Image: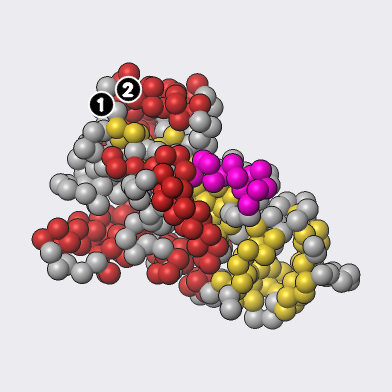
Amino acid sequence: MKTLIRNARIIDCKDRVIENGDMLFSEEGILEIGRVDQDADRVIDGTDRTVLPGFIDCHVHPACLCAEDEMTVSYLTYKGAMDMLRSGITTFRSVGTKYNADVRLRNLIESGQIDGPRIKAAGAPICITCGHCEEIGLPCDTVGETLKAARTLCKERVDWLKMMPTAGVLGVGPATEIQLSREQIEAVIAVGHAFNTPTCAHLMNYEALEFCVEAGLTCVEHGYDMDERIARRMVELGTWYVPTVAVTLQESTYIKPDTKHNKELVEKAAAAQQRVRNAVKIAIREGVKMAVGTDTGCPFTDPEHYAYGTELYLYSISGMAPLDILKAATIRGAELLGIDGETGSLECGKCADITVISGDPLEDIENCKRVDYTFCRGKLLYHRA
Ligand SMILES: [Zn+2]
């Protein structure tokens, strides 16, 4: 089925911004960009709208950190994936889902049995007993257990290995506590190299962050303690950064401090918000490779609360130019996930993963919250009523 969008602003996230252009695409891919003289099965008026490559969210927990039975987690993983279409997300990286439900959903979508966004899945995260995200993870307390967990995940064909070297905002005690040992971190990275599987780590402590970067980690998640020195090393080593700025803002804004636990949570989130804002400014200034991730699945971090658009807005007030933000949301994410040959920019021949929004995001980045249409591989999977 061919779709034609007429008279729209087209931002290809490569090198062109076309005012008043047309774009033709189908399940086969993007067919024409510019002036299109043929008809199509579906025609969309692009007046006052912008056509963008589908957004990529590189840090998501589609089942909302759910630790119930396998059936419930699987259903919530599917529901979470479909919800993300409302934010214009056509690809996401799942970095922590119990029972590897994200891997199974990826397989169903890739084999064409069901329609949905493109998924890169890390399965269950590697953590310690009683550590951060143990409820959804694979607790490992020795190097042997860590090697076994990492190899088992690779055998199940995860796209990424995710580990939890430190504690986090959600949970008891300080977020900065170190949990995985250096030997365990090295074991995960070694298995990643052996199986050609990239590694990412939840990092909220300076020492652990520095150790992971030097050990050859592929991507830093959160990295709230980033300073100039570490940022420069990340540039030298080509390490990626997915800061997840919005999550602690959402938590500190919306969680009611009505119990002792919630009060502590709000305070931890507010403190983390200060640190991540600083980290992001440094990363932008030093030119660290960045992709967008929201931590969707954490409290109040979801499409309903416009987590993705808020994340983009927070980049803009941290010094990133609007076009660079749109690239971080699309082509950079595709590079991080190793799929920039097929998606991430609007080019003829690439897959038609497309997001159509109202307004101009270069004028106001928060227009990215106004998603009208989301297409995955040329199929219309979301349309704002
Ligand atoms: Zn997370």
Residue 146: image location, x then y, percent: 34, 25
Instruction: Give residue 141's mark.
Output: 1
Say whether residue 285 is left or right of residue 360. Answer: left
State the residue at coordinates (64%, 44%): 110
Residue 286: image location, x then y, percent: 42, 48
Per the rendered image, the range of residues in magenta is 102-114
Q: Amino acid at mark 1?
A: Asp
Instruction: Spot the residue most to the top.
Output: 144
**Is ligand 1 within 8 Å of the beta carbon of the residue shown at mark 1?**
no
Instruction: Give residue 145's mark.
Output: 2
Q: Is-magenta flag for residue 67? A: no
Residue 381: image location, x then y, percent: 63, 63
> What is the tally of numbered marks visible in this picture?
2
Q: Amino acid at mark 2?
A: Glu
235 shown above or below 66:
above
Q: CA distance from mark 1 to mark 2?
A: 7 Å
- Quarter that holds the C terminus: bottom right
- Quarter that holds the N terminus: bottom right
State the residue at coordinates (69%, 55%): 377
Image marks 1 and 2: residues in contact by CB distance under 8 Å: yes
Residue 151 placement: quadrant: top left
Q: Is residue 173 visible?
A: yes
Label 1 crowd (10 A; few <14 / some 14-19 / many >=20): some
Q: Is residue 22 visible?
A: no
